[in-house]
Amino acid sequence: MRSSPARGDQPGENQVEDKGALFGELKNEAERILAGPGAAQQRLQAVCDLLCLRVGHYDWVGFYLVGSTEGVLELGPFHGKPTDHVSIPFGKGVCGRAAAERKTIIVQDVAGETNYLSCSPDVRAEIVIPLFRRDEIIGELDIDSHEISPFTQEDRELLEAISRAAEKIL
């Protein structure tokens, strides 16, 4: 699925106390999907769908993967509005910066970023988690939000755990 349907009320969307339980469920479900049958691209797509549909502040969820050109991220499976950024060099934008710096990057307000690639005027925050194989960057998980400062330590832990599971199939 490459576009977002209307979400309506999402589990845990308005109840902070439910976030831990929701994220535990999502971690388990994503790990089950990634360890399951099917092509890697289909499993990554299912994880994008799961996260975007279940977490109210995840408005775009996608994987960028290192393709045949070294130092360039190519758009892989995603859930959300289409983006013009289908190819991103390491170092450019938040995604490219996460790849170049080899670490998770959280930007709680993209308006303050000088090295930001705007995918949509609605995006207010972004978190990007790099994926590794034998210490080499092989891709990343990218989440955009239409809210300012939505990402917590719980979001980071969930997304880093899912990223470690995704590395195993790439």
Image (tube, rainbow, N blue to C red):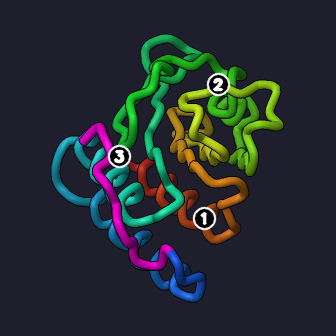
Where is residue 37, by image quadrant?
Answer: bottom left
* Left or right position of 96 against 109: left
Q: Amino acid at mark 3?
A: Ile
67 and 26: which one is in front?
Answer: 26
What residue is drawn where x is 72% and y is 30%?
97
Q: Position of residue 28 (x, y in %)?
A: 38, 73
Q: Are marks 2 and 1 in contact (CB under 8 Å)?
A: no
Question: Please, what is the three-letter code of the amino acid marked with disc 1?
Answer: Asp
Q: Which residue is mark 1?
A: 155
Q: Residues within 10 Å of mark 2 (few under 14, many from 20)?
A: some
Whether 12 is drawn above or below 166: the answer is: below
> What is the span of residues highlighted in magenta in the rendered image?
1-13
Instruction: Tell me the amino acid under the disc marked 2.
Output: Leu
Q: Secondary structure at mark 3?
A: loop
Residue appearing at x 77%, y 37% in the figure: 111
Instruction: Check disc 2 and report the residue beneath it.
Output: 117
Label 1, residues with CA under 10 Å away: few <14, some 14-19, many ≥20: some
Residue 85: x %, y % from top left: 50, 21
Q: Residue at x 45, y 26 (%)?
A: 83
Sequence-earlier tag: 3 or 2: 2
Q: CA distance from mark 2 to mark 1?
A: 22 Å
Judging depth in this view, the residue of 58 and 164 nearest the camera is 58
Q: Residue at x 43, y 57 (%)?
A: 165
Q: Which residue is mark 3?
A: 169
Q: Is residue 151 magenta?
A: no
Instruction: Locate residue 117 relative to residue 112 in the image: left or right.
Output: left
Is residue 101 found left or right of 89 in the rendered image? right
